[in-house]
Amino acid sequence: MLNDMRYRIQFQKKKPGGRLPVEGNDSWETVIECWAKAEGLKGREYYAAAAIQKEKTVQFTIRHREDINEHMRIVFQGVPYEIEAILPNYSRRHFITIKANVVSR
């Protein structure tokens, strides 16, 4: 499994802004950088995602961490992804799987 983790990804969280938030002026800061396995959806999962227009979903597998939550985003190869779900990997307890969608601009 560790040999498949060949991509470097970043987890970012929103920087606390001023008193008045300005729409479209979001600033993000990188808080975690780690190695990950990245793969697209396959088979039944892909067709289920395509039915609800979320076929740009990527599944990331990383080593288990406690400091990641759904309010963060992932930057993979320069493209931001919104975290949809963080799933524990029950077959291999030292890893977690994260499903994320491309952020629409």
Image (tube, rainbow, N blue to C red):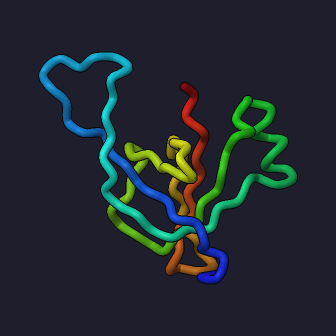
Location of residue 54 with respect to 20 vertically, above or below: below
Question: Could you tell me which residue is drawn at 30 percent across and 39 percent down?
Answer: 14
Residue most extreme to the left: 19
Report the side of 15 relative to 83 (left or right). left
Question: Could you tell me which residue is drawn at 80 percent across and 46 percent down?
Answer: 46
Image x and y of residue 65, in percent: 40, 69
Location of residue 44 with respect to 5 vertically, above or below: above
Quadrant in the rendering for residue 49 = top right
Front residue (pair 66, 33) = 33
Image x and y of residue 56, in percent: 70, 40
Front residue (pair 70, 37) = 37
Question: Could you tell me which residue is drawn at 35 percent across and 61 percent down?
Answer: 32
Image quadrant holding the C terminus, namely top right
Location of residue 53 with respect to 1 vertically, above or below: above
Image quadrant holding the N terminus, namely bottom right
Task: Give the total number of marks visible in the rendering.
Answer: 0
Question: Could you tell me which residue is drawn at 57 percent across and 63 percent down?
Answer: 97
Image x and y of residue 19, in percent: 12, 21
